[in-house]
Amino acid sequence: MYGYGYSYGDISAYITDILLLIGMMIIPLIAQIAVSATFSRNSRVHSSRGLTAEQVARRILDLNGLHDVRIERIGGKLSDHYDPRDNVVRLSDSVYGQTSVAAIGIAAHECGHACQHAEAYKPILIRSKLVPVTNICSYLWFYVFLAGCVLTFLPFLIYVGIAMFCAVILFQIVTLPTELNASRRAMKTLEGDCILEPSELKPARKVLTAAAMTYVAGLASSIMQLVRLLLRARR
């Protein structure tokens, strides 16, 4: 025992908790800074063909027979996504009308998601089925865990909260291969259909790789949070 009433185990657990908390905050931040910097840097590299990201997206969708998939412009930076409910690819202001290889790479990536849905790509189908449960768990897990800590006569709620958080992690695990596959599809299309010159493929790939790392960072952060929860449950 230490003079102030804390055991070595208490101090070790406290330090571990702090280190995990720091890692949870720093890793996603670094990944987000990296993708923003990579996108901004490669936004200065313009496609020699002069095609805009919206034109490229339309071309990719049409080549894959997805004539019914619409393309819309939305506000923000890197808020691009494919919405299967409305069957629309939404491109942000920083991508939509731009001719940079960075913007074209992002647009091609989102079209990759549209192709995944059209082909019934298994990981994205599983991801879609997990969305309702994940939305509930991501909102409630903390309150359930906290209730278990406060209501000492209901300690099982702690583990219910942890189980709900595990559902969130499962969703992230399933999301990762869908993102990587969409990026591979994008690069294959940009090269195979000669949308970008060989020298323009490398900067486009850098942008997509940096974007993928944000999902890896998010998963790593969640795993750290899970370790923190398990350690607290043991105490």
Image: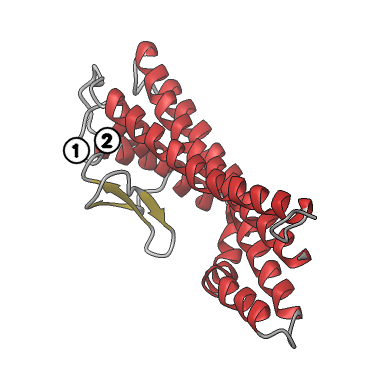
Query: Mark 2 = which residue?
Result: 53
Indicate the position of residue 33 as horizontal and vertical percent values.
38, 36
Figure quadrant of the N terminus: bottom right
Give whichever of 74, 232 is nearer the camera: 232
Q: Residue at x 66, y 77 (%)?
A: 149
Say if mark 2 contacts mark 1, CB within 8 Å.
Answer: yes
Q: Amino acid at mark 1?
A: Gly
Indicate the position of residue 186 as horizontal and vertical percent values.
45, 33
Give me the disc on residue 97: 1
Indicate the position of residue 224 as horizontal and vertical percent values.
63, 50
Q: Residue furthest bottom?
A: 153
The answer to whether one can see residue 7 in this image is yes
Q: Is residue 177 found left or right of 154 in the rendered image? A: left
Count of labels in the image: 2
Of labels 2 and 1, earlier in sequence is 2
Q: Amino acid at mark 2?
A: Ala
Q: Residue 38 occupies which quadrant of the picture?
A: top left
SS for callout 1: loop
